[in-house]
Image (cartoon, rainbow, N blue to C red):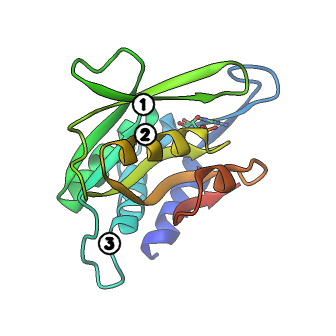
Amino acid sequence: MDRSGAAADALARLVLDVPDFPEPGIVFKDITPLLGDPAGFAAVVDALAAAGRDADGTVVVDKVVGMEARGFIFAAPVAIALGVGFVPVRKAGKLPRETYAVSYELEYGEATLELHRDGVAPGERVLLVDDVLATGGTVAATRDLVAACGGETVGVAVLMELSFLPGRETAGDIPITALAVI
Ligand code: AMP
C-alpha cells in the first residue's frame, strides 16, 4: 500500500465517531485508537509530512506549527520527520513570554490563541498541522498569528476535513492537505 493508502486505511479503521460529544449534535472524531496503533500513527505522520515537501521530496518549510491540543500530537512528529522546528500555538495565558494573540468566534462564544513573538522568524515558511478542519476558525486565527511574526503560512495539513462545514473558505486561499474528507 502507498503512503496515502496506508494513512486512509488507518483513519478508516482507527478513528471512532462519538455522537453527541461534547454536546448534542456534534459527532466527535476520537483519534485515541489511532494514537495507540504504532503503524497507523506512523502512517498518518508520514502522510502529513508530505505536505511540507515538494514533488522531489525536498523540504520546503522552515517551521511546523501545531494548534493546542490535538494538533501538538501530530505536528511534533511531523516537524521531526521534516527536520525543522515545532512551534506551539496555545490557548490564552499558557505561553510564558511575549506573545501575539488573536481572538475568533466559536459556535458559542469566543476563543483566543497565542504564539510566542519569536516562535516564527520574519520570512519563515510555515506548515500548520491539526487533527480536524471544521469551521476553519482555528486555521484562520493561526495564519494571522504567523503573519504577525512576519512568517508565511504555505500549507495546512489535517487528518480529517469536515466537508459539510465551510473550513476551506474560512481558512483562506492556501493549499490544504486532508488525509480524509468526511
Ligand atoms: P475549527 O476551528 O472549527 O476548524 O475547529 C478545529 C478544532 O476543533 C480542531 O483543533 C479540532 O481538534 C476540533 N474539532 C472540531 N470539530 C471536531 C470534531 N467533530 N471532532 C474532533 N475534533 C473537532
Q: Tell me the crowding category of disc 3: few under 14, some 14 to 19, or many 20 or more residues within 10 angstroms, Cα based.
A: some
Looking at the picture, tell me which residue is in the foreground, 65 or 5.
65
Residue 85 drawn at (x, y percent): 20, 49
Q: Name the amino acid, label 2.
A: Gly
Residue 168 drawn at (x, y percent): 65, 56
Q: Name the amino acid, label 1.
A: Glu
| Element assignment for label 2 | helix
Residue depicted at x 28% and y 48%? 77
| Element assignment for label 3 | loop
Alpha carbons under labels 3 and 2: distance apart:
19 Å
Q: Quadrant of residue 104?
A: top right
Say if mark 2 contacts mark 1, CB within 8 Å: yes
Looking at the picture, tell me which residue is in the foreground, 44 or 82.
82
Residue at mark 3: 53
Q: Is mark 2 within 8 Å of ligand 1?
A: yes
60 left or right of 174?
Answer: left
Q: Quadrant of residue 135?
A: top right
86 left or right of 167?
Answer: left
Say if mark 1 contacts mark 3, CB within 8 Å: no
Alpha carbons under labels 1 and 3: distance apart:
24 Å
| Element assignment for label 1 | loop
Residue at mark 1: 68
Residue at mark 2: 71
